[in-house]
Amino acid sequence: MNPAVQRLTEEVIALHAYLVTAHQPDQHLRRLVDRLKITGTVYLHVDAKVAIEPFCDLDAVLIPDRMVIRYPTVSMTRAVLNLARRALADGATRFTLLRQQHYPIVSDARLIELSYNTTTDFIAAHSAPDASRGKPVERFNRRASPFGVHGQLSYKIASGLIARLFPPLNWEQALDGRQLRAGSAYWSLTAPTVAGILDEVQRGGPQIDYFHLIPSPDESFWHTLVPRYSTSLDCRPISWSTWGDGQHPLPLDRDALIEAMADPAYLFAKKFTDANADLADWVEERTVAPTIVPEVVPAAAQLTMAAPPRVPASTSSASGTRPTGFDVRSSGSGHRHNPAPGRSRLLQSPR
């Protein structure tokens, strides 16, 4: 490989951290990791309910601090915080959150541009509540049940009992003037923004505690906190999904992909699985570039997108020094690909 190309390839991989959550070792996950590793480092959180061994040969950093993921509790947000801490400690400057059913629908050159963009945070942080966006009041004033399985009768019964025993949550009081925001759970953030949020989580306080209580905080926690630390915020989603009448996105079809790929804001789509691998083949035929070339870099300071509007930051601040619910790092054993001696550099919980 040309030395200049080799240098740029290594630099890009060091800059961009892909934070990926996974729960099963299917072939699509392997395909996703192999594609993403061309333009970044993949940090993988494997649900602690499953064995880690089938994931160990993936070319990814498997973080040892694993959570048992229970939708729609705070467990997913904790898992992502663990991923972000590790990647920040490793020196990443761009953080992109995905799940194992994602796949890029743009070229590698476009992802390189994203890697070199150190100023813009991409997250669909829209004002909430907003029933028209699927974020009604009930998503923010009721408590998530720690009992039962979501979608089953046991969860509905437990949620009903909790609603009767506890008064509705007051997000305006908890957030102390900070605007509640919500949107797609997937985003791409800069290092200063991620560092600011991790620092606020470490300090704790009522604003952090609030997100520990509500259902699906992964769709509002980052969105509400990002504007305080971002200097340039683009509220368009980076991930395309096709939704039906249920709680989860539907598998993709070609028509949906054509629509998604026509919009320059979308960089990824889901839900890709082993069952629709032909769709990933179809995407690759239209997006995979033969080589990473040095000419990409001079244009990489800005994404080839319209300049995003600046979103004013809130003026309130979190306070306190006590640990919060988000500081519970691990609920299972873990494995790190190519392990180094000693403890992970993740922040540790009080024991």
Image: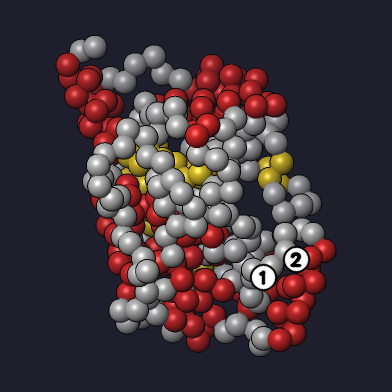
> In the displayed image of the protein, which residue is found farthest to the right?
153
The span from disc 1 to disc 2 (Cα, nearest Å) is: 7 Å
Tell me the kind of residue under disc 2. Tyr
Q: How are the residues colored?
A: secondary structure
Q: Residues within 10 Å of mark 2 (few under 14, many from 20)?
A: some
Quadrant for the C terminus in the image: bottom left
In the image, what residue occupies the spot 44% across and 27% down?
57
Residue 265 visible in the picture: no
In the image, what residue occupies the spot 33% across and 62% down?
348
Q: Nearer the viewer, residue 72 or 276?
A: 72
Q: Position of residue 244 (x, y in %)?
A: 76, 47
Q: Position of residue 310 (x, y in %)?
A: 36, 61
Residue 209 visible in the picture: yes
Q: Nearer the viewer, residue 62 or 242?
A: 62
> In the displayed image of the protein, which residue is found farthest to the top?
1
Tag 1–tag 2 contact (CB < 8 Å): yes
In the image, what residue occupies the spot 25% across and 47% down?
342
At mark 1, the secondary structure is loop
64 lies above or below 134? above
> In the displayed image of the protein, which residue is found farthest to the left?
3
Query: Which of the 4 quarters of the picture holds residue 321?
Result: bottom left
Q: How many numbered circles are shown?
A: 2
At mark 2, the secondary structure is helix
Tell me the kind of residue under disc 1. Ser
| Label ID, residue 259 | none
| Label ID, residue 155 | 2
Quadrant for the N terminus in the image: top left
In the image, what residue occupies the spot 72% across and 81% down?
163
Residue linked to disc 1: 145
Q: Nearer the viewer, residue 105 or 63?
A: 63
Q: Nearer the viewer, residue 345 or 176?
A: 345
Q: Position of residue 248 (x, y in %)?
A: 69, 49
